[in-house]
Amino acid sequence: MALRQVGYENRSFWRNPAAAFFTFLLPLIFLVLFNSLFGDSKLTIDGRELDGSTFYVPGIVALAVVSACYTNMGMMVTIARDNGILKRVRGTPLPPWAYIFGRLAHAMLLSLLLVVIIVGVGAAAYGTDVPTNTLPGLAVTLLLGAATFCVLGLALTAVIPSADAAPAITNATILPLLFISNVFIPLQDPPEWLATVGDVFPVKHFAAALQTAFHPDTTGAGFEWGDLAVIAAWGIVGTVLAVRFFSWEPRR
Amino acid sequence: MSELAVEVRGLRKAYGPVVAVDGIDLSVRRGEIFALIGPNGAGKTTTLEILEGHRRADAGHVRVLDVDPARNDIAFKARIGIVLQSTSIQPYLTVEETVEQFRGYYPAPRPLDELIDIVGLDASRTKLVRRLSGGQQRRLDVAIGLAGDPELLFLDEPTTGFDPAARRGAWEMIRGLKALGKTVLLTTHYMDEAQALADTVSIIRGGLIVAEGTPDELRASQAETVISFRFAGSSADLPPAASAATIENGRAVIHTTDPTTALQELTGWAKGRGEALEGLSVTPASLEDVYLGLTGDEAQ
C-alpha cells in the first residue's frame, strides 16, 4: 500500500512541469554552469587543496538533495494540504504513515537518481573521480541527509500559512544557507559570524561530509562522524516537530 | 447492528466564541437518503465533518454505523465514503489512475469500470484530472468516495456550482446509490434538491434543527396556501382576510392557512366592486416557501 503510494507520487511528479524543472533540471543546469565558469580553478577549503570540479560535484549533489527533499516537501506538501488533498486522504483507510512514507520515499529516490546523474556527468564531462573506497560514507551521508531534509521540509509546512506562501518561505529559509554552506561558492575566510551560522545548520555539514567522500585524497570509508552527528540531530528535531505540528487540514 | 446508520444526540461544537452546532439530534435510517439543508454557516459542514471523523465534537453522543467517529479508526473509515465540500484531487493523475489509487486504500473496493461508469466518466478515463471540467472533477470526487463500496456516503453540497442538466444527472446518480442499498447523508442549500432526493429532510439554522420530516410532512406542517391575483391598489383597500397581503409587481399575494374564508371574502369583495379577480391563482406552499419561512432572510 505504502509502496504503491510512492508510484503515484512519482507519476504526479513527472507530469508537473514546474516541479520537474525546479527539482530536477535546475541542479543539472547549475552543475554545468559552475563547472564551466570555475571548474578549472584551484581552491583551498579547510586547508585542503582541490580542483573546482571536485568542489562543485559534491556541492551540486548537496543542492540536489536539498531541493528534492526539503524544498520539494515544503512546497508540494503545503500545496496538497491547502488543496484539501491531504484531508481527502485522511478520510480513507490509508494509514497516515503510509501517505507520508510515500512522499518521503519518493523524494529520497528522486534525490538518489539525481546524485547518480550528477556524478555521471561530473565524471564524463569534468573528469571528477567517482567515489570507490568512500562509497559507504557517501551512501550513509546521502541517506541520512535526504531523510533529514525531508522531515525538515515536512516540519516547515507547519509554519507555512498557505500554498501561496510556500515557495517564498521554503526558498527564504534555504537559499541563504546554501550560499554560506560551501554549496554554490567556496567560502574563503568568511566573517566569523557567517561561519558560525553556517556551522549551526545542517547544510554546511552535509556539503562537508560529501566533499570528504568525493575528495580523491580521502582514505578510509569516507565517514565524517562529526558532520553526520549534526545532520542526525537536525533530523531528530525535524521529526519531533513534524510529528507534533504537522497539519492535514487546509488553513483558513 | 442498529437500524440507524447515524445517531446523534445533543451534538455541540464551537470554534472559540462562535457556536457552530448548538445541540442537535439526528437519526439517519439505514438505506435512506437524508438531506441536511440550511443556509451557509448554519452548521451543516461542521456536523458532517464530525460524523466523518475529521473534527471532534465538544459535547454530545455520536454514533456512525455503531462506531464513535472521533476514534479515527481505520476499519471505520473503510465503511464510509466521503465527498468533501470542495473538490480536492491530485491534478496530475488520470481519471483511471485516481480511481485505482483510491481503490487501493480499501479492503473490498468496487470494480474500477463500475465506478467510472456510475459517475459517467467513461469518455474521460485517460484524461488528466486537471483537464476535466469542474463538474467532471466533482463526479470523479464522488467516484473515489464510492471506491471502497461504503455502507454510508457523505456528500457535502454535491451539486453546488452545477448547471441544471448536470444537477439532474447527479440526482439520478444519487438515487442509483440508494438503489444499491447505500445510506446517503447529504447537505445542500437547494430545497428542490432535498425535495427531489431525500426520504428525510432536516432543516438546520444557526446550529439548531428547526424542522425535520419527510418532504410531504414538512409541507403539511406549514399548511399555507398562496392566493394571488392582479391588483394595482393598496392593501388597505382589500377585505380583512386579505389585509396582510403584499403587493408586488402589480399582484396581491396572500399567505393564508384558511383559504376557503379568504377566497369567499375576496370574491364577495370583488363582486361588490363589480370587478373580477384577474389572473387568480391558488397554490399550496412549496417546500421552498417552508424553507424560506423557517430560515428567514439568512437563506437569501
Image (cartoon, coloured by chain):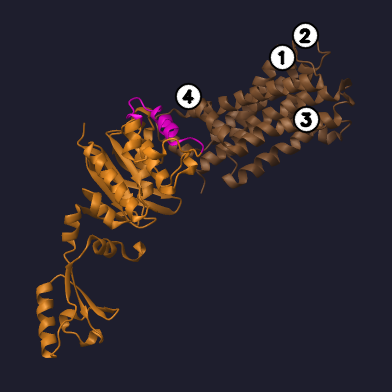
Chain colours: A brown, B orange
Badge 3 vs badge 4, beta-carbon distance below 8 Å: no
Find out whether residue B140 is within the magenta segment. no
Please provide percent x and percent y for residue B283: 17, 68
Residue A137: which disc? 1
Q: Residue at x 10, y 76 (%)?
A: B261
Boundaries of the magenta span: B92-112
Residue A4: which disc? 4
Q: Amino acid at mark 3?
A: Val
Comes first in the chain, label 3 or label 1: 3
Question: Residue at label 3?
Answer: A32
Question: Residue at label 2?
Answer: A220
* Other-residue count near label 2 (Cα within 10 Å), few / some / many at <14 / 14–19 / ≥20: few
Q: Residue at x 56, y 35 (%)?
A: A15
Comes first in the chain, label 4 or label 1: 4
Closest to the camera, between mark 3 and mark 1, is 3
Is residue B71 placed above or below A165 in the rendered structure? above
Comes first in the chain, label 3 or label 4: 4
